[in-house]
Amino acid sequence: MRILLVASAFNSLTQRVHTELRARGHQVGVELALGDEPLRAGVARFQPELILAPMLTKAIPEDIWTEHTVLILHPGPKGDRGPSSLDWAISEGARTWGVTVLQAVAEMDAGPIWASVPFPVTAVGKSSLYRNEVADAALAAVLLAVERFESGEFTPEPLDYARPDVRGRLRPYHAQPYRSIDWTADNTATVLRKLRAADSQPGVLDELFGHEFFLHGGHNEDQLRGVPGTVLATRDGAICRATVDGAVWLPQLRARRTPGGPPTFKQPATDVLGELLPAVPEVPVSPAVAATRDTWSEIRYRERDSVGYLEFAFAGGAMSTDQCRRLLYAYEQARTRPINVLVLGPERDFFSNGIHLNVIEAAADPGAESWRNINAMDDLVEAILTTTDKVVIAALPGNAAAGGIMLALAADEVWCRESAVVNPHYQLMGLYGSEYWTYTLPRRVGAATAERLTQQTLPVGARAAHALGLVDQVIPGSPAAFWAWVRTEATALADSPELADRVVEKKRRLAADEAVKPLSAYRAEELARMSENFAPGSPYHELRQNFVYKVCATATPAHLLG
Ligand code: COA
């Protein structure tokens, strides 16, 4: 079928729907909802048999939904209506929630129901829930709805609140007054629920040292205690704040925009507070200790059956210079351990999205900071590429893009959850790219495919990535099921009689490759191009600013039209 995706942004869920529908042989186009007239023009141009809206914040014009079947994906169970479904689900502590595919009608979210799929509400931030549990349920619901539409025999179910399975209701926008934290009364569980419901957007508006900030992220702290509301400590850019019965870590803050002032964006909390922050102790935690505690740490390390697991989780998958250096240090420590296999990856969600564009944007000299950041990424990639005494596995429970997917390709094998979507290209940010991609990508997929993937700038689903040789294993199921599988396979690999031969072969291959062209030459060539990209006046600076300040596109990018 010719299916047109209409979306407010080509976000992760829209990318996932795009890759999965294409994989099923549908012809898929994308039209960003940037106004009624461009949308009408886009529909007239594409001539869709079905219009699907995976993520839409505006209403579709009546003439479009009367002439075409328009199916809207709503992140709530049957009967749920309103713009803040997930915020309400998390803040009220729902254990299960749902995704429903509705036909567009005049009244928002009130159309006939084509499919509805439940999902468990894991105790994570809203955007992580959205990119994982919601996305998985959404995909199932979309595929069911498309199949039903294609059959021509399905009659969608009118919304009827008398039915026992219709448990939702119309709820208002989850405005800041619902989110506000009373530090003198709210216990840790309540504070964390409020933070998760607002993560990663819009954050919880709060006051610190007489200034207003949005709080982003939130994690329990198991040891530090103090006067409720006070800042107790810092760690790796995050601040720890006491609650009435414990404490929580706040990794990122965003200053409230002053009327008429410049827009603000998220940054590490200590960077935003700067001199406002009183002298509180920096309380580091080692990756190995972090793995045994319920405290915030971006890096954890554990061992099991001669396998080392270096877990990392960076908000939005972005890795600043400092974060790259910390991960490199932890990697170097892990490298010295008596293990056969080293597995790298987060527990869930993004693997990595490359250099930290927000931290770069905030730097006094963004070009210089970009340079430091890409070199720190390259140092990390180099350490992985030159690890010749053990097998290194990159485990992707979630998406990866740009330098983040190239980071994964430095490992010997890439194991990927079926739901993951990868974007192996840099061009949309105006960058040539580094992370030794000119060595690793063609080595995996061949020069022609490497050229196509980097130039076409389209997302690639995990199955398609596997078919191309970009990833080695694809496993269906939840992030927890994925990790259960990874642990079993990693143990089997570590114990396998072939492991010694593999390690010898790996060393031989690297030496042979280096004899043809040293790794340092790939890096030098890539960085020469990146140096041009980072120079003043190059398109990268404007593209980065648009990304960081979330400037809306003015037209649907040509590569998405289909
Ligand atoms: N630096 C800083 N923040 C980043 C980031 C990066 N490299 N990549 C993603 N993020 C942030 C986003 O700003 C967003 O923040 P928010 O939750 O506060 O809105 C969050 O991570 C999720 O990203 P989003 O763009 O909403 O997710 P998506 O799934 O729709 O799109 C990408 C994913 C990777 C396609 C998109 O984020 C992207 O293009 N990132 C930049 C990749 C890049 O060019 N890196 C630099 C070159 S190595």
Image (spheres, rainbow, N blue to C red):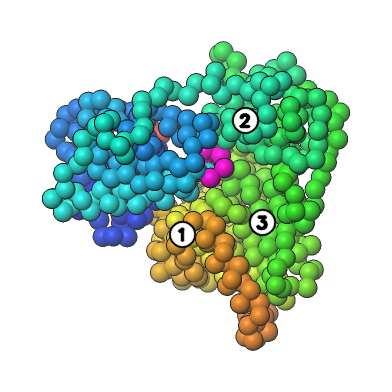
Query: Residue 126 colored magenta?
Result: yes
Q: Residue at x 68, y 63 (%)?
A: 309
Magenta range is: 122-127
Callout 1: CB less than 8 Å from ligand 1: no
Q: Is residue 243 above or below residue 220?
A: above
Can residue 537 be seen from the camera position used here? no
**Residue 306 in which image quadrant:** bottom right
Residue plotted at (25% across, 25% down): 107
Task: Look at discs 2 and 3 and give the one toward the viewer.
Answer: 2
Compared to residue 97, the image places residue 331 above or below, namely below
- Residue 355: percent from the left, percent from the top? 62, 47
Q: Residue 365, how many percent across, how many down? A: 69, 36
Q: Nearer the viewer, residue 211 or 318?
A: 211
List the residue tagged with mark 1. 477
Residue 253 percent across, percent down from the top left: 65, 30
Mark 2 in CB contact with mark 3 (< 8 angstroms) = no
Label for residue 311? 3
Q: Residues within 10 Å of mark 1 (few under 14, many from 20)?
A: some
Report if the beta carbon of the residue with label 3 is closer than 8 angstroms to ligand 1.
no
The residue drawn where x is 46% and y is 70% is: 469
Pointer 2 residue: 190
**2 sits left or right of 335 in the view:** left
